[in-house]
Amino acid sequence: MNNVVIVGATSAMAEAVAQRYAEDKANLFLLARNQEKLDIIRQDLLVRGANSVHQASFSANEIESQPQCVDQIFDTLGTVDVFLIAYGSLPDQDLCQKDVNKAVEEINTNGVSVVSLLTLVANKMETQATGNITVITSVAGDRGRQSNYVYGAAKGMVSTFLQGLAQRMHKSNIHVLDIKPGFVDTPMTAEFKKSALWAQPEQVAKLIYNRINKKSNFSYAPSFWFAIMSIIKSVPKFIFNKVSL
Amino acid sequence: MDKLTSWGQYPYVHADVKTPSKEELPVLEFKSYIPRGLGRSYGDSALASAVVTSKKLKHFIAFDKDKGLLTCDAGVSLDEILRIFVPQGWFLQVTPGTKFVSVGGAIASDVHGKNHHIDGCFSEFVQSITLVINNQEVQCSREVNSELFYATCGGMGLTGMIVNATIQLRKVKSAYIKQKTIKTNNLKDTLAVFEEHQSSTYSVAWIDCLSDGAEFGRSLVMLGEHAEQGSLEVHQSGKLTIPCNLPSQLLNKYSIQSFNFLYYHRIRNRETNDFLHYDPFFYPLDGINNWNRMYGKNGFTQYQFVIPKEAGYEGLSEILKAIVSSKQGSFLAVLKIFGKENNSPLSFPMEGFTLALDFKISDSLFPFLNKLDDIVKKYKGRLYLAKDARMSESTFKTGYPRWEQFQKVRDNYGTLESYNSLQSKRIGL
């Protein structure tokens, strides 16, 4: 795994994954909106042993600039061994309900822009006939819930897209991995009260790193979310609609 | 409000704990707080009603491969430094008995290791420090703001929040240590062995505090040198975890006596030579996660004092005798010879003998420790702030005569009101 691309590299989980590849002396290409934060992370990864660290600006809402951005990545690295998409935003559900523009914007950020990027990357990777594409989605995409169904719908869109993509790319020897974290203690969730179900970003990063290495297809991170989501998915609608989740 | 404690699980406080990122740090709204690293100090030095942790200050900033100079955030742990740098042939110049401390914490406590008699404290290898003082960044080193630099090393976080530092690493060829263990018969013998091996890079003794009579002060003296051969493999993470507080009755006079007996008689010969990894040599207790829970839910305290060289055998044996006769046994009793005192007014080590003992908290403990304090004071010694949860203001001020100089620096930089801990208030800082 020599050449690793991470989009949304300033997220806590992405950074922890990047550290693991840096220790493997990988060439890293990091993309994010905030270049100052990225500067700090690039220096850190170089000290940790990364062979090289490239960085570029990326904003989820500028879909038109994606083709150029993807070209730049593949031109710089040659081949890409791991392409990790880790960005996202956690919207305020209330706001999305009141303001249709907000709802559409969140679907675009967490859903449409990822689908767009994946389409471009998949076509490049297909010609390489080797490598991995990993996307961090969410358990929220498994079933819509009143507390965050706009976010859930966008993540669910990406997960469904990845199911098909994984099948298509299998023929070209590309491993497509959908990672669905449960609750993770990151800046994105700083406002939440934490319980025993919460995982640390380093813990999830280790799972991602290991699953990429083993070409695993298992999505839930940590794994116990498989059990929780199996139950949540199997609750009949006439009961589900009456509970507050 | 969170319920917060440190390694000794005594005392507990209700604290407003904030974990800011680098950008958030200068705009904190606390009027007064205490900085906190990984919470490995034993007592109340990182406890206050308002606490700011360095958990999010965890980036490496730069490494000079030729000189071995590392610049990193204050929240980076020694564990992390070893994990990244041992494979590249670098080790810490000075390390305490656990690797789960932050760089900021190591500086603030001016920690020492088994090589103090040769190399001094952690701060001897700190080149520069960046602090945030009252929302302003301030740099200090031996050349720039030197008063602040010396006060910050060993300053227990009372001079501001350390945000990053540049430290010197040690070039090593191997991750292994050549260890020599010498079994001594009594305290005189132990001190003679230290004397004889003063050129050893690392030296420490484990004293059996419960043996009396002719065997009073019998010890295992452990000496070490970095090996020339062996791989540069890094340590593994701890395999054992103590999942909850154990019943405190588990550690009693009989269990401790048997442990001490077995530990001492495990070594059969006068001299044993081993070749072992740095992890068991420097960090024997790091292999058991949360070993502090062994002492039960009431917690424990570590009593670590130093008495000057002149106090010698007489002073050391007077304190040891008091401990032996009290039967308030300690699980671990570690003896070490310190080299010279440094420029930092609150740095603990001074040329002489230091002994560290764990005591589980009980009703009779504090009156007993007050008696030990009196003996330490008599010999012009002092107690280690990073371990302390109970010393009096007068014990502190007699032991650290440079405390006024420390306060003057704090006054000059405006930190008297804005950085305080339970400990600093108790001891009159």
Image: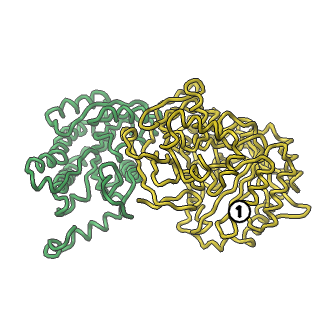
Of the pair A85 and B323, the residue shown nearer to us: B323
Instruction: Check disc 1 and report the residue beneath it.
Output: B331
Chain colored green: A
Could you tell me if residue B51 is visible in this image?
yes
Image x and y of residue B377, in percent: 76, 51
* Horizontal arrangement in the rendering, residue A26 relative to residue B285 (left or right): left
Which quarter shows the N terminus of chain B? bottom left
Occupied quadrant, residue B109: top right
Occupied quadrant, residue A53: top left
Q: Secondary structure at mark 1?
A: loop
Could you tell me if residue A17 is visible in this image?
no
Residue occupying image coordinates x 34% and y 35%: A37
Image x and y of residue B146, in percent: 59, 28
* Label 1: few (<14), some (14–19) or many (≥20) C-alpha neighbours in 10 Å: many
Of the pair B421 and B295, the residue shown nearer to us: B421
Looking at the image, residue B327 lies above or below residue B289: below
What type is the residue that disc 1 sits on? Phe
**Residue extending furthest toward the right:** B214
